[in-house]
Amino acid sequence: MSKHSINYEQLPKVMKNIDLHTHSTVSDGTYSPSELIDLAETQNLAVVALTDHDTVAGLTEFIKRAESSDVIAVPGVEVAVNWRYKEIHILGLWIRDDCSELNNLLKEIRNNRHARNDKIIDKLQENGYSITIDEVKEVAKGESIGRPHLATILVKKGFFKTVKDVFSTCLARGGTGYVARILSDPETAISAIHKAGGIAFWAHPVHRSHSNTKDILSTMKHFKELGLDGVEAYYSEFSKTQHEMLLKYAKNLGMAVCGGSDFHGDNQPNILMGKGRGNLSVPKSVYDDLCKIL
């Protein structure tokens, strides 16, 4: 673990909590699938899920490493979809990585992502930023290549100080290098997750402190009609009020809840596995409750 910037061995360990939202080098994280299990052991986590963006390529390594560990590994994925002209994410947990319907959907999403990357690079070059797709592929160790990898290149080349600076200037919506994604709809993603034997959740449904609570509730109701099983009620960015709101909505609608840190390793060093921004605590009872509906 010495190659990473955070020394987890010097941090207080969590007490048998869980983390059902992490990313590896197969998408935009900096820990390999195996290293995520190593880290979960260090943190005394009982359960951890690998939920890479739009790919299941890391699950075999992840599950194999967990076979020699006390940590329970949950195979997952995070799928980007379009809802009312906005990008939202659907988490799939307990999925099979050999499901043709899911894999075909993920391949389509990745192909659209790759086409988008080419367009972003063209715009960046037009604005004086020297960057090529070959450089990006060299940084991205997996098949799901996205904006964080482009941002990493621009930081390494000295154009910006931080990845956050890159996004705020170039890669976020409205930025000089921004290109909208072509995405599927929520119903298609939910159906593919179910075909793969998984449970589908709306990931981080609260994006900002001023999110309209009525919109969240109405969206949860609509997604439930589409087959959504639950929501991510425990998350790094949520306030206590937002967390309690989502628990209440889920209970009233008869929906399940999950939760996790959205860990990306050194790419987001302020978010720690199992701890989020320091105050995240997802109890193992969440995992036990989910096992009852599998």
Image (cartoon, rainbow, N blue to C red):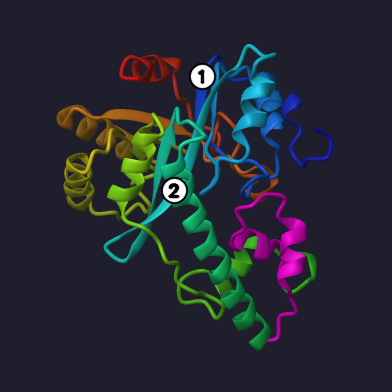
Q: Position of residue 211 (x, y in %)?
A: 29, 54
Mark 1 or 2: the one toward you: 2
Q: Is residue 61 above or below residue 72?
A: below
Q: Is residue 123 above or below residue 78?
A: below
Task: Name the residue type under label 1.
Answer: Asn
Residue bearing mark 1: 17
How far apart are labels 1 and 2 at the CA level?
Answer: 25 Å
Residue at 27 percent across and 38 percent down: it is 228
Tell me where residue 170 sits by quadrant. bottom right
- Magenta residues span 127-155
The reply, left or right, for residue 251 in relation to residue 150 is left
Farthest-out residue, right:
2
Residue 79 - label: 2
* Count of numbered circles in the view: 2
Query: Which element is circle 2 on?
Result: strand
Decide which of 73, 9 is in the foreground and name it: 73
